[in-house]
Amino acid sequence: MFKINRTIRKDLVITILLAITIPFLTISFIYANSIKNIINQDVKIYQEAIIKQSSSSLSNIFSSVKMIQRSALGKVISDYIPISYNSTLDKNDILKLKDLIEFLYITDNASSYVNGIYVIFESGYTVSSRNGIREKLLINREWIAEAKASRSSEIYTEFHLAEYNVASPRGEYDSVISVVQEFILPEKNGARVIVQIDIDRTVFNNFVGSIENNEQIPMFLINSKKGKILLENEIYSEYSQKIDRKEIIVKEEVIRDILYLYAYIPTDRIINRFKSVIVGILLIISFVVLISVVTAILLSRTITAPLHELFLCMKQVGQGDFSPVYPHTKYSEVDFLIESFKTMVNEVNNLIALVSRQQSEASEAKFQALQAKINPHFLYNTLDVIRSIALENNNSDISDMTLSLSRLFRYNVGDLKKTNSIGNEILYIKDYLKIQNYRFGDRITVNYDLEPELNNMMITRFILQPIVENAFKYGLELRGRGGELRISGKIEDNDIVISVYDNGPGIEPSKLEFLKSSLSAEPNIKSITKAHGLDNVNLRMKLLYGEKYGLFINSEYGKWTCMNIKIPIIYGEDCDKTSYN
């Protein structure tokens, strides 16, 4: 079987490390999670502030345009002239028209947002801040037709070239967004005019690229009625091409029910902020673990050094050197172990000296061998010497008890896999009971009731004795006088059933159920390696004979306990060849 080389020092180092690192790692995890949440919240708040600022900036631009549009409309209403192809304008009308053109021109130049103001009359004439009066200017543009069909709703175009705002063609034209709306003038007999204000593209430069690239947030402005993007910043074009994006979407209203600003806060930006915190925490964890390892090793050495020295002393004695140098310690528990071991070594030395005197005829080599390795044969020889001394002093009780004990020792150190006859097993049980008789005297009576044919049938060694010992330990020793031990055996349903009965205090019902459950459990590797006592005997029987065999217990609390041993009928030669003598 593979044996794990474990030491108290190693386990203590591991325990100290776990005691230090587990709470620290737990606290570090909680701290890191808290920091992550704080960073997450701070970054999100910061990004949302930038988004709100952009939304507010765009809203201000369009609100200013709206105010200019209303101002132009007011001027049109106050100085309205019904221009048509056949109309004749008097001097006053011409002055009003000139005044309107000047007003549009001044308003256009007064605002950095505006790149042209146009008033389109039903007759097809257009009065503008850039071209004065023009016939059919803009009349065929799609957004003009859309404004007429929208019933006074605001129209926001996409970026387009304003080639119509110059008197003569040129190589490059301004790029603009047009805000167009048709108005009905009730005070002018329901006349209709369309006001168009062009917003220069440069106005949106702050939105498109003023923020540094590492802080810029992907954003775009969308016309919700058309579902078309009017404006997007530089980073959005690149960001929109990414696959497997993970982001937080923020939506801000710029013009109610029409224009909305969408922004994406990438989560990897939050993670990047958190990486530096993680690196710092990992460095701290590494430092704490290093300090913990050094501390654990130093503490373990301080605590376990006396135990390790005691271990070396025991190893030295085990190798035959009975004069070790014993360690000194300030720990009372370890000092007690040292003193106990010192006493044991002294007693062994005294025993060796006694055996040496009683067996002076033995050679020096044999003595050295006995001193070098204390093994079961040393114990057998010691018992034989004690028996010889008892016989010399005519003490038959000590002689008989020593003989029984010697036979039991020889029997107990044998191979547990070998079988023996039931008759021989009963003889070993009688040796055991003889020793118990010297202890209990007439307090306990023993009765045997075994069918004669069982004597030659085979049973695995060391099955009966643990059951009898158990009956004494948990039954008869607790009763006092009047104890009875009954060992019976019979053939039942082609199997052998041996019963060990005692009239001790019995077993409590709850504990009895636990024992029954334990004895009936299916054997496995874990149960085999951890089994002891009755479980050990039961598992050996099940593994050797099969699931239907083993130990079966019954008890009446306060009255008796009976352990039944069930084995198959076996005749064979595979038995312990050691004679019972």
Image: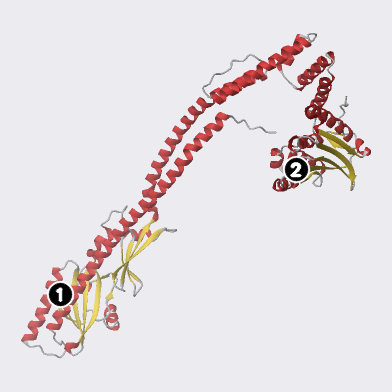
Q: Quadrant of residue 64?
A: bottom left
202 is higher (above) or lower (below) than 352: below
The answer to whether residue 172 of the structure is visible from this angle is no
Q: Nearer the viewer, residue 51 or 467?
A: 467
The residue indicated by pointer 1 is 129
Q: Position of residue 144 (x, y in %)?
A: 26, 80
Say if mark 2 contacts mark 1, CB within 8 Å.
no
Residue drawn at (88%, 31%) of the image: 424
**Figure quadrant of the N terminus:** top right
Side of 100 relative to 355 (left or right): left
Residue drawn at (40%, 38%) of the image: 284
Q: Nearer the viewer, residue 429 or 202?
A: 429
The colour scheme is secondary structure
Label located before the other in sequence (2 or 1): 1
Residue drawn at (36%, 49%) of the image: 273
Q: Position of residue 101 (x, y in %)?
A: 12, 77
Q: Amino acid at mark 2?
A: Gly
Side of 269 relative to 359 (left or right): left
Farthest residue, direction left: 91
Q: CA distance from mark 2 to mark 1?
A: 116 Å
Q: Nearer the viewer, residue 445 or 205?
A: 445
Helix, strand or loop under label 2: loop
Side of 221 relative to 15 (left or right): left
The residue indicated by pointer 2 is 506
